[in-house]
Image (tube, grey):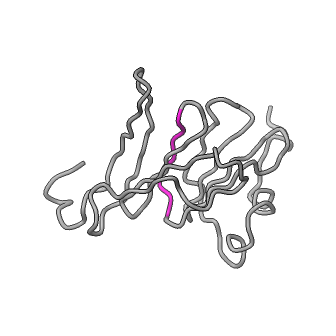
Amino acid sequence: MLGGELALYQDEVLQSVPEDYRCGKALGPVESLQEHPQDSSKILIGYSRGLMVLWDRSSREVHHLFLGNQQLESVSWERSGRTLVSSHSDGGYALWSMANGSAKTLQPTTSTVPYGPFPCKAITKVLWQNCDSGGHFVVFSGGMPRASYGDRHC
């Protein structure tokens, strides 16, 4: 049974968002909902304008903000929950870290456009996978240069 205490309304999230993300601009639709891999009381909400909010369901407040500046397409957590990867409409993806101790992350740790520098199609889906050796790899779909998109697919 779903009660009102389990529902999450956009207005409730907006109260914790910085002013420049609220003033006269909509956050856009939710593009991604991801449960934190180590703490099921936290969910990551990714909005199309690029804002990602780590929401704490138990305290009903924002635990962390990730302030992206590109249109968001997809998000994936690293297994420990300290890092996440987001993909964007410009053909790039970004790695974000929560290790800085701040409740707000303004810049990603790294950001790359794999098939740039020319304009690229969106990376519509991204996944972060850890290896047994301790390394990781990022798997994504899309991102091809616009000029050659019709010739081959990624």
Q: Which residue lies furthest to the bottom in this view?
A: 24
Q: How many marks?
A: 0
Residue located 24% across and 48% down the image: 154
Whether 73 is among the magenta residues is yes
Residue located 60% across and 45% down the image: 33
Residue located 49% across and 46% down the image: 85
Q: Taking 133 as reference, is 97 above or below it? A: below
Whether 44 is among the magenta residues is no
**Residue 37 locus on image (x, y percent):** 61, 31
> Magenta span covers which residues?
71-78
Looking at the image, residue 126 sits to the left or right of residue 11; the answer is: left
Residue 133 vs residue 143, the one in the foreground: 133
Q: Which residue lies furthest to the top in this view?
A: 132
Split into 4 quadrants, where in the image is the N terminus? top right
**Residue 115 locus on image (x, y percent):** 26, 57
Report which quarter residue 83 is drawn in.
top right
> Of helix, strand and loop, which mostly describes the magenta segment?
strand
Residue 101 vs residue 139, the one in the foreground: 101
Residue 135 vs residue 50, the one in the foreground: 135
Residue located 30% across and 64% down the image: 120
**Residue 42 locus on image (x, y percent):** 71, 39
**Residue 58 locus on image (x, y percent):** 83, 38
Looking at the image, residue 81 sits to the left or right of residue 129; the answer is: right
Report which quarter residue 52 is drawn in.
bottom right
Q: Which residue lies furthest to the front in this view?
A: 100
